[in-house]
Every structure is written in structure tokens, then in C-alpha cells.
Image (cartoon, coloured by chain):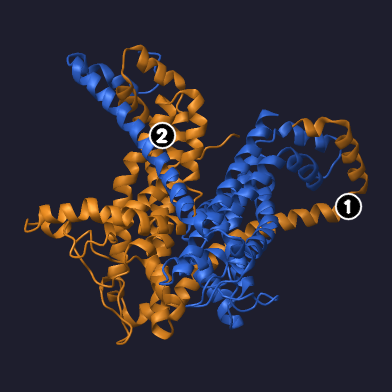
Amino acid sequence: MDTVPSDNAVTAPSLPWRRVRRSRYVADRVLKIVCTLFTILGASVLGWILLMLLVEGVGGLSLAVFTETTPGPGTEGGGIANAIVGSLILTLLGIVVATPIGVLAGTYLAEYGRTSKLATAIRFVNDILLAAPSILIGLFVYLLMVEPMGAYSGWAGGVALAIIAVPVIVRSTEDMLRLVPGSLREAGAALGAPMATVIVKISWKAARAGMVTGVILATARIAGETAPLLFTALNNSFWFSPNLMGGVSNLPVTIYQFALAPYQNWRELAWAGALIITLSILALSVAARLLLRKDKAR
Amino acid sequence: MAVVSDKASMSNLQMVRRRASPAFDQGFRWAAYGSALIVLAVLTGIIGTMAYGGWPAFQKFGFGFITSSAWNVGKEQYGAWVAVSGTLTSALIALVIGVPVSIGIAVFLTQLCPPWLRHPVSTVIELLAAVPSIIYGMWGLFVFAPLFARYVQVPLSNLVEGMPILGTVLYARVPSGVGMLTAGIILAIMIIPFIASITRDILDQIPTVLRESAYGIGCTTWEVVRYVLLPQAGVSIIGAVMLGLGRALGETMAVTFVIGNANRLSLSLFDPSSTIASRIANEFNEASGMQMNALLALGCILFIVTFVVLALARLLIARVKTH
């Protein structure tokens, strides 16, 4: 008993279980069964959702889905080509804006700021942003960009998505850089390399796989976001203008509007879109995990 | 790591050293510093714009804005209470259902699961967090709600009809499947991966020797979990729960699909209601004038509540870090 370093652990002998053997057995069994059931329940929800998407979505998939634009009210057929392309552009825009900021801020926390007060504060703020309601980020960008510019735009949508992606990238970059052994940095410094060079050529290189994983996970995170786009990129049933001003069609908002619509073809397109977006995001998430695992194995 | 020690990058490094100018070194430092400040600026920007935009509503309605349940666009009467109580109730239901399930999953993954199954099951649970919120909304509305109405709401409403308290709380006037309880259940599913994976990491960090000592004196798995692991993990698990709560409070799309978006206060968990986030999602694009100010004021309230909850979560969770 003395070897147990915690007070909490030593309380066991005073418990009634020494006398009641059967209840111990039952409690143990109940715990095991309940925990197993909960896990099966959690996993089967994922299976159920995928099954639903396959059953409802595969029927709606056709070539037209990828080539035609979103249909107007009461018109037949149509596709979601403009929404797919719009989503790709918005996601790309978000990640292109977020990656340099996120990587540099994460680098600041891990390499420059470390335990300073400012770094601690930023780490704290970043953790809040990581879980902040995405709809409020939409409101913020609306007031920041849409209202002053007088129009919804793809730029505003991209910025809203970037704000969601940045904290994900900051966190993963910092975590990965912290795993790089200090001796590597010292070796670089001993060769006379300035700090920035040590970071770029040694720390980043050693942490590369983890940092790329962070960016992929951030992409997966923003690709399905609907709420921040509602007030920024809005939506559009046509091909958007090349300068991305005005509403830019995108998959999440199209799904949101079409799923609740009274038209059969709209609902079918919503299911097809939901299938496409979910499979893409799950594939990205799995790919990111595999990348990290492969790197660890090496 | 092998990358750095190979000859190519070493010579590469030396070349860079010869070329590297102090300007690059300084510039890089400032770029990193600036980016870090952007993170800070975004958070202050969000709270600032919410407060600024919501200020006219707070000023006009005063403290009554929070306690009033009126929301009348025509009469320009706005009160936050229906949305605030809807947000709190749905998040509370999510915790009541989600927390035991999450801890159960974490215990299964760390204590009961055979090693070969651990990684795949962990991944599946984590992927639940990757599914977009709107997909949960569609699943909730088109798959879960009809089943819920048929097999839970209707039988339960028949059972409790006329009973004192239960007859109000669990009675569905219109058993459509959408409403407060459905929203809470969907939210529970959505926060399970977050709470479960953090709890799993916390349980993993507890020194194995503690567990082994307990098993050594003859404890059963239940006793190890109840009297060794949970007390050890203690406060950190509350932190994980707070993080889940933060997520549940601000969740928008899934809730908008299944809560029914009603504007009145109801005591029944089966009745439609709305949350702050769902109301903003529904009304903001068509809003102007005082309605927009009122919605921004709602956003401000939501931000303050989630900020406090997430800050508590952050303080309670000892961050999983390798130094």
C-alpha cells in the first residue's frame, strides 16, 4: 500500500466490497457492459450517418450534378457544379490566408515567446478561438467586411473561414515544434546560423509532417462550415462573378437551403451534396491521420 | 528527424548561413510576432464588434433585455430570455446525455479495449467530430426525428398525459419529433467525440503504477475506475466537460434543423424552441435596425457565456504537452 503515491488510491480497503462479493462482481460487469455499449453506440452513429448519406445521396448522383448549375425554384434537373467550385475556392482562399498566419503564430509561441506573458496570453486566446461559436465569426466578418463594402462577397467568406482555420493551425504547429528536440536547434546555432534560419531549416523541417497534418485538418474543418458563410459569402444559384463580389455559391449553404425546400430535385441535390462533402471531409481527416502515423513510424 | 542529420541539408544550412542577412532574421521574427498578435486582435475584434453592434439594444431595453421573453419584430420589442433559456437547456440536456457516454467510451478505450482495436475505435469516435454540423442537422431532422416521434414522443405523451409535472415536461402537443429534447440529443452526439478523446488522454496520463497497485490488491475494473482513475483525473475531466459545454452552447446548424425555431417559452421538452445561435442564423440576413442590434446583443451574450465556459475549461484541463 505504501508504494501507491496517491491518497485517493489507498481508500479501497475501507469499502464494503470485502464483505459483498456478489455486488462487486455485478458492478464490474455492469461497468464493462455499459462502457462497451456506449462505444458501440458512438461508433454506430457514424455508421448510421454514412449509411443515410449513401442511401439518400447515391441515387441523386449523376453527371449533371457535377456539370450543371443549381436549378431555380420549380425548374427540373440541375446540378451543384457552381456550389462545388465555389466551395473549393472559398476553402482554398481560407486556407491560403490562414496557413502563413497560423504557422508563423505557432512558431512564435514555440520558438520565440515560449513561456513569456504575451505567449501565454495568446495561447489562451487561441484555445478560446478554437472552440468559439462559428456563427459569431460570421457576424464579426459581416460587420468587418460585408457592411463596409456594401455587398456579400467570397472574400468575406474566405476571411471567415480563415479565422476558423488559424487557431487549428496555430495549435498543431506549436505542438509539433515543441516535439523537436532542443539539441537540434543548438546544433544549428553552433554552426552559426541565425535563429530564423535554425527555425526554417531545422525546426520546420523536423516538424514538417505534423505541420502539414495540421493544415489538412484545418481544411477539413472549414470545408463543411455553414454558419460563418451564411452572412458572408451567402449563396448564389448562378456562376459567381470572377472577382468574387456578390454572393458566391457554396456547398454547405446550398445544402442548407435545398434540404428544407419543397422541390424534389432540390432535395435530391442536397443529399448528393451532403454525400460529396462528408466523404471528402472524412477522407481528408483520415489522410491527415495516416500521414502523421507514417511519420511517427519513420 | 533523420532529415536534419543527412549531409545534403547540412551543406544546405551552411550555404544559407553564408547568405543569411540580418534582415531576414529580423523580418522573420517580426512576421512571427505580428501573426501572433493577429490571433489576439481577432478575439478582441469579435468581442468589440458584438458589444458595439449590440449596444443600442442593451441601452434601449436595459437589463430587461435578458429577462424579457418578448421577441416581436413588428412592435420592435426584443427580449433574450427564450433564446438564452433555450441555449442553456439544450446544452444542459446535451451534457446530461453526453458526459456519461463520453466517459464510458474513454474508459472502454483505455481500460477494456483489446490493443488491436484501440486505434480504429479511437479514430471512428474522433471522426464523429469531423462530420459537418449541417449533416448532423439533416440526420436529426430526416432520420432521427421521425423515429423519435414515433417510438418515444407518442408513447411517452400518452403515458404521462394528465400527470402533474411529467404531464407538462414530457408531453408533446404536436409529436413531430423536433424540439428541445431532440436538439439536446443531437448536441450530445456532437460533443461526445471532444469530451471522450480528452478524457481518454487524461486517463492515459495517469501513471500505470497506480492502476497496477489497485489491481494488485484485488480491485475489480469498476473499483479501479471509480476509486483510482476518476479521482485522479478529477478536475481535468470537469475541464473536458466544460469544453463540450462550450461547443454545445454555440452549435448552430444542427440545432437550427431540429429545434423547431419557435419563439415562445414552453415548459415541455418536446416543444419547439430556439437558441441564440439558431435565432441569429434564422433572422440575421433579413434583419435591420433594432432587430439587428438585438441579434448582435444576443451574439454578445453568447460570446461572453462561451468565453467564460471555455476559459474555465482551459484552466481545468492540464494541457497534454511534451516539453
Which is more toward the observer, A262 or B310? Answer: A262
Inspect the image, locate mark 2, and give the three-letter code of the amino acid beneath it. Ala
Residue B16 versus residue A70 in the image, above or below? above
User: What's the CA distance linking mark 1 and mark 2?
Assistant: 51 Å
Location of the N terminus of chain B (image quadrant):
top right
Inspect the image, locate mark 1, and give the three-letter code of the amino acid beneath it. Ser
* Image coords of residue B108 (percent x, y): 39, 30
Chain B color in figure: orange
Query: Is the residue marked by circle 1 packed among few (<14), some (14-19), or many (20+) residues within 10 Å?
Result: few
Residue B300 versus residue B121 in the image, above or below? below
Please give the name of the residue rendered at 70% of the width and 76% of the height, measured from the top-left corner: A243
Residue matched to label 2: B106
Chain A color in figure: blue
Nearer-N-terminus badge (1/2):
1
Instruction: Nearest to the eye among marks 1 and 2: give it.
Output: 2
Q: Is residue A118 visible?
A: no
Q: Secondary structure at mark 2?
A: helix
Query: Is the residue marked by circle 2 packed among few (<14), some (14-19), or many (20+) residues within 10 Å?
Result: many
